[in-house]
Amino acid sequence: MAIRVNDFTINIATANGTGSQSANLIILHSMYEMGVPVSGKNLFPSNISGLPTWFIIRASDAGYQAPGDHTHIQVMMNKDTWEKDLNNTEPGTVIIYNQDVKLPVERDDCVVLPMPMTKMARSISPKMAKLMANMYYVGAIAHILKIDQGAIEAAVSNQFGG
């Protein structure tokens, strides 16, 4: 994968009804708050809870709003699309995944970052774990991209009304 500056794509694979839309918008809005030219697109074949959904975020100094040709950060949260998402991931991609899904990610040509997202969320609130697990990939992306803490806090406050 060629080195690009100020043009990258994040692909977040989740399931409908898991609270991922809130998490995805927090990433999008926090980047926007920092002045990053960014766009987001939600791709979902159905509004039925549990079916696959992908949220694509593209940051582009050129102002491109369509998804990029390559995914630079792949978030994997959905066991039903796991194999397809993994097979579509190009060498050099950063893969952030919920290791509690207990499916393999055997890619030595990518940067693989497993996180026990569901387990960590359950330790805070078993009742809300399904919805909270997504916030862990928000934190991972914020750390990797060095998203400003103030921008994240503002986006969280805006998203959850507090």
Image (spheres, helix red, strand yellow):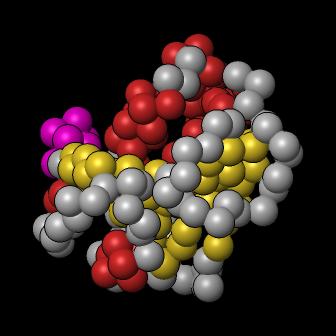
Tell me where residue 84 sits by quadrant.
bottom left
Q: Is residue 11 left or right of residue 59?
A: left
Q: Residue at x 70, y 22 (%)?
A: 34
Is 125 inside the magenta-drawn segment? yes
Q: Is residue 39 left or right of residue 4?
A: right
The percent coordinates of residue 99 (x first, y second) are 18, 57
Query: Which contiguous range is marked in magenta?
Result: 118-127
Residue 9, visible in the rendered structure = yes
Residues 157 and 36: in front is 36
Relative to 158, is 38 above or below?
Answer: below
Q: Is residue 55 left or right of residue 94?
A: right
* Residue at the extreme right: 63
The percent coordinates of residue 156 (x first, y second) are 57, 30
Residue 22, visible in the rendered structure = no
Tell me where residue 87 sits by quadrant.
bottom left
Residues 58 and 28: in front is 58
The percent coordinates of residue 33 (x first, y second) are 73, 25
Q: Residue at x 50, y 31 (%)?
A: 145
Is 25 inside the magenta-drawn segment? no
Q: Is residue 31 left or right of residue 136?
A: right
Relative to 10, is 7 above or below?
Answer: above
Q: Residue at x 23, y 64 (%)?
A: 107
Q: Quadrant of the C terminus?
A: top right
The percent coordinates of residue 150 (x first, y second) are 59, 14
Principal secondary structure, stretch drawn in magenta: helix
